[in-house]
Image (cartoon, helix red, strand yellow):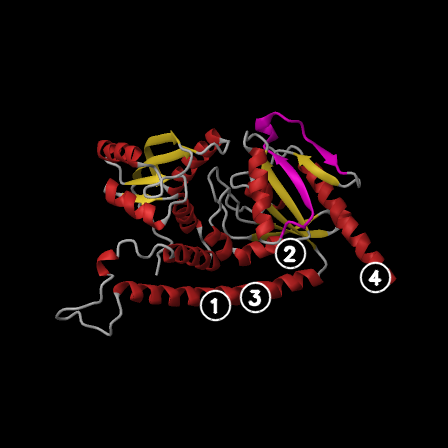
Amino acid sequence: MVNVSSHSITREKALLVQFDFNEGGYAERLSEFELLVGSAGATAVGMMRGKRQAPDAATFAGKGKVAELAQSVIEHQADLVIFNHELSAGQQRNLERDLGCRVVDRNSLILDIFAQRAKSHEGKLQVELAQLEHQATRLVRGWTHLERQKGGIGLRGPGETQLETDRRLLGHRVKVLKQRLQLLERQRGVRRRSRERSEALSISLVGYTNAGKSTLFNALTHAGAYAADQLFATLDTTSRRLYLGEAGTVIVSDTVGFIRDLPHALVAAFHATLEETAHADLLLHVVDSASPDREQQIEAVNRVLREIGADQAPQIIVWNKIDVSGADAGLERDEYGRISRVRLSAKTGIGLDILRLALSEAALRREAARASSRALA
């Protein structure tokens, strides 16, 4: 069983590695990488950069860079090397052999942060499932000396290798976790249908991690949800009622933040939680308007929304952090007269009244549509 709650009190010293594959947004990716490492609780003691046309098949970095890295590991007495890229099991194994220390890729780094942040029972189950499914793809690592059949005095057994035993035990644990999560998903479905019968407009906050969703959620609902200037501060979905005067009461939910290249194992494991987003009547897509990488972040969020089947839900873009970007509070309407974008600062409260207006209009429009449908029936 993977322990998803414990992490070292002492900060590990990490060497960071990021290559430029001409994808664009290199500086923003680098800044995000450093924030990810800090969020995981490590201290960056050095950074290796470089340009490549394609990853090296054996070590991702190539022989020359690996030799440089090995020297840096010794000089900085680094505990581990972290790549801001996805490594194959073979690449990871070869790098650990050549560098003489642990090597962590981007997927494992994000999984570790999720493991530290998970608070609810369901959140911990989801993270453990994601970790185990990620681990299953590279289980051979560290067990190559046990690939042969057990043998010798005290070691003779039924003919199952250690690797096969580990795969069987891991597979059993994955099955148990999936069953538990399916039960929790059914329970959530019952609660969701109950909310639908109450006819309250359901609103989900979505957005890139650290865009300010939880700060906005607290500003709207006075919920006191945990909000911090770090990646993935929120993992567990929190819902609150919000009274909008003549528009009545709506249900607002805060959800986990998204990030580019989000590991597929995490998307799959958190599918039950993310399904709340897919069933929402309205999405508030919170954007950090002060980020130079905001357009790429918007696309990364929309990509995950497509993956979970939530891309058809109506969206209002919330242009957050105008206190930093210098934009004025305001709104924009689409060709149908509906509010499509709101500029505000969740931190200072400027523009919150405009967002409440947008939510009221959405709730009243939905109620009018339902009344018309009932009349026709």
Instruction: Indicate whether 352 appears above or below 269.
Output: above
Mark 4 vs mark 3, CA separation in Å: 29 Å
Q: Which residue is mark 2?
A: 279
Q: Which type of secondary structure does the marked residue at label 1 adopt?
A: helix
Q: Which type of secondary structure does the marked residue at label 3 adopt?
A: helix
Please identify, in this view, whether the residue under mark 4 or under mark 1 is nearer the observer.
1
In primary-sequence order, the first of circles 2 and 3 is 3
The answer, for residue 354, to whether it is visible in the render is yes
Look at 59% across and 49% down and name the residue there.
305
Q: Indicate the quadrant containing the C terminus: top left, top right, bottom left or bottom right.
A: bottom right
Q: Amino acid at mark 4?
A: Arg
Q: Amino acid at mark 1?
A: Gln
Question: Which mark, by number, is residue 374?
Answer: 4
Q: Which residue is mark 1?
A: 179
Mark 1 vs mark 2, CA separation in Å: 22 Å
Q: Which residue is mark 3?
A: 187
Mark 1 vs mark 3, CA separation in Å: 13 Å
* Tag 2 and tag 3, C-beta contact below 8 Å: no
Left or right: residue 305 versus residue 40 is right
